Image (spheres, rainbow, N blue to C red):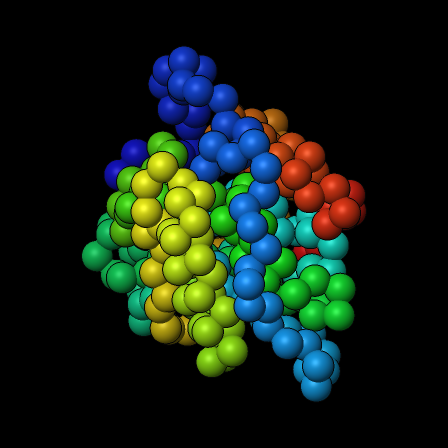
Amino acid sequence: MIGRLALLAGAATLAAVLAPAGNAAPVAVPLQQQDVRGVSGPQTAVFAGGCFWGIEGVFQHVRGVREVVSGYAGGAAADANYAAVSSERTGHAEAVRIVYDPTVVSYGDLLRIFFSVAHDPTQLNRQEPDEGPSYRSAIFPQSPAQAAVARRYIAQLNAAGVYPRPVVTRLESGRFYPAEASHQNFLNRNPDHGYIRRWDLPKLAALRQTFPRSWQAQPAR
């Protein structure tokens, strides 16, 4: 696994990241949106798409999102910690838990941002410089309705040939465990960190440019 606590040597020679999947425009709106009628109060989504620093940072700036927590999903509580997960033997993925207002932003909207600018859903068990199953692309539906929307959206994107390679995002089950305090709100606390500047700030720029109506300048916590 490639470490990320220092800027990857030679990273400046790589292609600039504006949208991880290489899209000049956002991917299509899901044909099926989760129906918010009858839904009361905040809802939760859990996504995994590489280093949780950048995924957290992107969704903190989405209008309607109230809270984003970095953590681990897909494994057991006993080894839901950074040292163990980094060994790539625990089954966890680095993930984020998003609490959102469904009257402002739908689950389908969150998926669209996830697949457009937050990560590259065609990279298998890696995301840019980070390699290993803990960096896989995965969705952890919090309800049967979310599972249905996500499954059909992945099929929709593959059928449309949106990407040069198939979407490898998996639908998985499992509890979410918050990460250590040092990983929470990392992007906003460390905007000059080499990894953040190289890999994650371009995602924020892509979000703001591609989804201007969804952008909120003040990040959620």
**Residue 142 at x, y = what percent?**
49, 75
Q: Nearer the viewer, residue 159 or 7?
A: 159
The quadrant of the picture occupied by the C terminus is bottom right
Q: Nearer the viewer, residue 147 or 220?
A: 147
**Residue 108 at x, y = what percent?**
59, 62
* Residue at left offset 78%, top offset 43%: 217
The quadrant of the picture occupied by the N terminus is top left
* Residue at left offset 50%, top offset 69%: 149
Q: Quadrant of residue 93?
A: bottom left
Relative to 75, is 157 on the left or the right? Answer: right
**Residue 182 at x, y = what percent?**
53, 49
Q: Is residue 217 visible?
A: yes
* Residue at left offset 55%, top offset 68%: 32
Relative to 63, is 179 on the left or the right? Answer: left
Q: Is residue 183 visible?
A: no
**Residue 9 at x, y = what percent?**
36, 18
